Amino acid sequence: MDASKRTVIYVSDGTGITVETLGHGLLAQFDGIEFRAIRFPFLDTMDKAQECLSRINELYESEGVTPIVIMTVTNKEISALIHLGQAYFIDLFDSFIAPLEEQLGARYSRAVGRSHSQAHPQYDKRIAAMNFALAHDDGVSDADLKSADIILVGVSRSGKTPTSLYLSLQFSLKAANYPLIPEDFERNELPSRLLQYRSKLFGLTIAPEQLHRIRNERRPNSKYSSLENCRYEVAAAERMMRREGIKWFETTSRSIEELAVQLMQELNLDH
């Protein structure tokens, strides 16, 4: 197998969201290697574990290099069986649970999928935040804006929607977003319904060239997507945000995760 390509197997007795998120964070530190992901979620029986073990060994035989297995499995017997495979294992429970048990003086519960369960105390708050973000996406509604934790503004396709949804999913924030449109620039003022929520407003901006590429995929060869119009809208939006004292963030080279963390710091919220 090409040394620049490696197979990564994510194994979990729950959804696998946690283990894959952590795995991506680790593997992103290695440039020049293409990681192919294989997922084994809801691995909660010995039969499923045996299937996973067989797949691990098949990959080892066919690729000639040990696959990387990143796992969170609470059942000791299932975990032990999987560890028989020809692979390099990163067992997140083995790495972190035992030291935490010693530090806390308590045994962990072995409950599967607890962090994503409806019984988790943050679950209802997260769902409410997601519903709020969807209901207040792209200026669709201004109902109950007083309940918003944050309101994002910026030109169309500057990253407002994905950032709002990530803030709601990851941090349970009620995030609304509003587009700044040519009519706002002609009036030379923010949408009137946002004025009373100025303290909650944060802006997103983007390089005109990047905005042009994004818009051109959606509406090619239109005025909306033209580079000239993108330059005009970005410049007008930044002038408006500067005049209104709205702090803005550049989205061109930042990931949604980076933006979200920076916004959390600005809000000074303890989540």
Image (tube, rainbow, N blue to C red):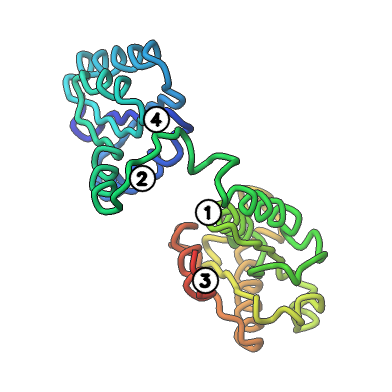
Q: Earlier in the sequence, mark 2 or mark 1?
A: 2
Kind of residue sitting beneath label 1: Gln
- Residue at 39 percent of width and 34 percent of height: 110
Q: Give the quadrant of residue 20.
A: top left
Q: Are marks 1 and 3 in contact (CB under 8 Å)?
A: no
Label 4, secondary structure: give it.
strand
Residue 147 placement, left or right of 217: right
Kind of residue sitting beneath label 2: Leu
Find disc 3 in the rendering and name its residue: 269
Report x, y in % for residue 144. Answer: 79, 66
- Residue at 32 percent of width and 33 percent of height: 71
Instruction: Tell me the crowding category of disc 2: few under 14, some 14 to 19, or many 20 or more residues within 10 angstroms, Cα based.
Output: few
Report x, y in % for residue 131. Answer: 71, 51
Report x, y in % for residue 82. Answer: 27, 21
- Residue at 54 percent of width and 74 percent of height: 267
Find disc 2 in the rendering and name its residue: 22
**Which mark is on residue 12?**
4
Q: Give the quadrant of residue 88.
A: top left
Q: Nearer the viewer, residue 218 or 142?
A: 142
Instruction: Tell me the crowding category of disc 4: few under 14, some 14 to 19, or many 20 or more residues within 10 angstroms, Cα based.
Output: many
Mark 2 and mark 4: span between their CA atoms? 12 Å
Instruction: Tell me the crowding category of disc 3: few under 14, some 14 to 19, or many 20 or more residues within 10 angstroms, Cα based.
Output: few
